[in-house]
Amino acid sequence: MVKSKKVMALGFFDGIHVGHGALVNRAKEVADALGAEACVLTFDNHPDTFVKGEKVELINSANDRRYVLRRFFGVEKVYFIHFNGETMRMDWQVFIENIIDTYNAAHFVVGHDFCFGYKGLGTAKVLKEYCGKKGIGCDIIDPVMRDGEIVSSTIIRRLLSEGETESANELLGHPHVLTDTVRTGYRIGGSRLEAPTINMVFADGVLVPKMGVYATKVVLPDGEHIAVTNIGVRPTFGGDRVTVETNILDYEADLYGQNVCVEFHSFIRPERRFDSPEELMAQIKKDCLSARRYFE
């Protein structure tokens, strides 16, 4: 069986912001022209954890990135490589030859600062020269600017940490997302507050945005639903670990065990402790009204 030709956008794509979007959109354009398949090749873990020994707080999990690429860019084929010591020591030419052979790559699209292979010796310029000799296409995408600054994952991390969700989303080009399997929670929402919630968590190593209440949308097979999401430790009930509890407005169904996406649109208020569950419930009703007004 002959593999279809691939036009491959290469990079880590943390957050998949508008700069990454330029790469992906170019890959789709070239794929259409060549009658090939556009896809993304990335790592499921950040290379700096090995190369620099640094813990990098990611904007998204690998599953989040796959979701964003499919939902907002229409890219179905997303391939992940696990970065480890062997990958770190691999010669850049061996690395790229493996990709060409494995995926039948006919064209690459990379960012201006892309590097790969041992000690990062495989740069975007080196890749383009190599591809020219091999008869393979290669596009290098210039940085995308906003307000005189290069759009970067670093800026977006800061904005999310400060609760500047709308500003972060402008740089992302789409809502910030959390995908997870709905799990059992504390059952406080349904049993004591009469506000049923779904419970999720951020994966290890993924940035937890500013704790508080957000206007969100939950994406389910039957469409999008307005919701209110609380990120925090539940101080009213003496909690001590971060949870993500989402109240889907005007919706009743058992979503336990299902894979769900929450899209964060706007920060409503910081998390705070209330003197009683009744006082908390009154505030939740106000938060729900705020979310409805936001989406109107």
Image (cartoon, rainbow, N blue to C red):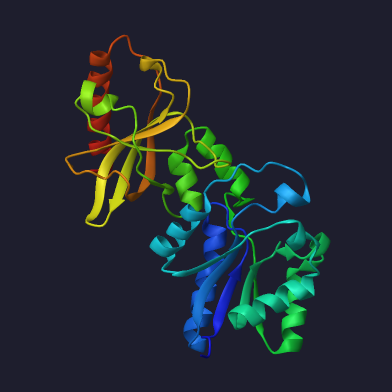
Q: Position of residue 232 (x, y in %)?
A: 43, 27
Q: Quadrant of residue 22?
A: bottom right
* Picture quarter with the C terminus: top left
Q: Quadrant of residue 280?
A: top left
Residue that appears at 52% across and 63% down:
21
Residue that appears at 58% across and 74% down:
8
Q: Position of residue 28 (x, y in %)?
A: 49, 76
Residue 126 seen by the camera: no
Horizontal relation, residue 249 to residue 21: left or right: left
Q: How many marks?
A: 0
Q: Position of residue 122 (x, y in %)?
A: 78, 68
Q: Position of residue 271 (x, y in %)?
A: 41, 23
Foreground pick, 234 / 114: 234
Horizontal relation, residue 211 to residue 44: left or right: left
Location of residue 116 with respect to 109 vertically, above or below: above
Q: Quadrant of residue 252?
A: top left
Location of residue 93 with respect to 147 vertically, above or below: below
Location of residue 138 with respect to 147 vertically, above or below: below
Residue 160 seen by the camera: yes
Horizontal relation, residue 242 to residue 144: left or right: left
